[in-house]
Amino acid sequence: MAFTVLMAFGTAPTPLWPLYEARDHFGATTVTVAYASMVVGAAAAFLGLVHLSDRLGRRRVIVPALLAGIVASVVLIVWQDLPGLIAGRILNGVGLGLMASTATTYLHDLHHEARPERTGPVLPGIVATAANLGGLASGPLIAGAAAEWLPTPLITTQAIFTLAMAVCLVLVLSTPETVDLELPAAEPPSRFVLRPGGRRTFGAAGALGAFAFAILGLISSLGASVLHGTLHTDSHLVVGLAAFLMFLFPHGLRRPPALIAASAVTGKVHQGGPR
């Protein structure tokens, strides 16, 4: 649930970009920069912080991820101009980066503790992919509905997600820790390694996933502006619904490329010791 909510918070601005453009008087280029600032925060968290869950525990990383999301939403509420928007998006990205990798591993750990006789990683991988894509899809739909029917949508949307993330924070604090914190600090954490012969499939799946999400990022940053400006669509709900369908079915009604990539990676990657 926490994974889904934080991912939804990341894509929630998709139908709101025309409102931000009108409030802060900027154009499509600045929208792209504001959207990309979240990626900067996520990349920094991926590269510099995700390994901490192996030493500090999964929950001790997921909690700061949710706190980063809550702080980001507060920044977006109280700092209502372009620098505040970019700062909030960067913080949002940091939370997403911490959550995306750690939550997936946490799901594997919890599944292994609950079903130790089942060694295959398929079910946790499917759940993680569903939470990821489900969150990405639901964010614009929720924000579009808020913008369509609720007052002050730029504030109301953030308040909705602040409350949702606060509830998730309480729930996460009640979950068990799966990392043995009594292990010697010098012991290196386990890491994922490719199975023999899986390099080509892994590379193809990674490239496919990167391309799919690059297209989704481009459309989600500028799609609302195109629908409002070029196609003269005034309904924020319609824009949110379009983004919802795009994230949920990025390859039409066939299997989404991101889900294909996730399935391929799941089949070709396994957890191994340090090498």
Image (tube, rainbow, N blue to C red):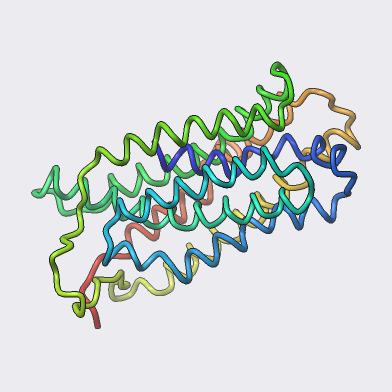
Give the image quarter of residue 244: top right
User: Is residue 51 positioned above or below 217 on the image?
Assistant: below
In the image, farthest residue toward the bottom: 275
Q: Residue drawn at (35%, 42%), measured in percent from left and top?
A: 127
Residue at the image position 60 percent from the left and 27 percent from the top: 142
Identify which residue, 206 or 31, lies in the foreground. Answer: 31
**Residue situated in front as seen by the camera: 274 or 57:** 57
Residue 100 left/right relative to 195 = right
Looking at the image, how many numbered discs can be counted on the residues? 0
In this view, the residue in front, 225 or 180, is 180
The extreme top residue here reads 149
Image point (42%, 43%), residue name: 3
| Residue 137 visible within the image | yes
Tell me where residue 89 appears, x and y as whole percent. 64, 51
Image location (x, y in percent) of residue 115: 13, 44
Residue 190 is situated, as x and y percent measured from the top left of the image, at: 24, 71
Q: Quadrant of the N terminus?
A: top left
As displayed, is residue 251 above or below residue 242?
Answer: below
Q: Residue at x 23, y 77 (%)?
A: 188
Instruction: Identify whether 269 is placed above or below 165.
Output: below
Instruction: Tell me: 242 left or right of 104.
Output: right
Quadrant in the picture for the C terminus: bottom left
Q: Provide residue 71's location: percent of width, then percent of height.
A: 55, 46
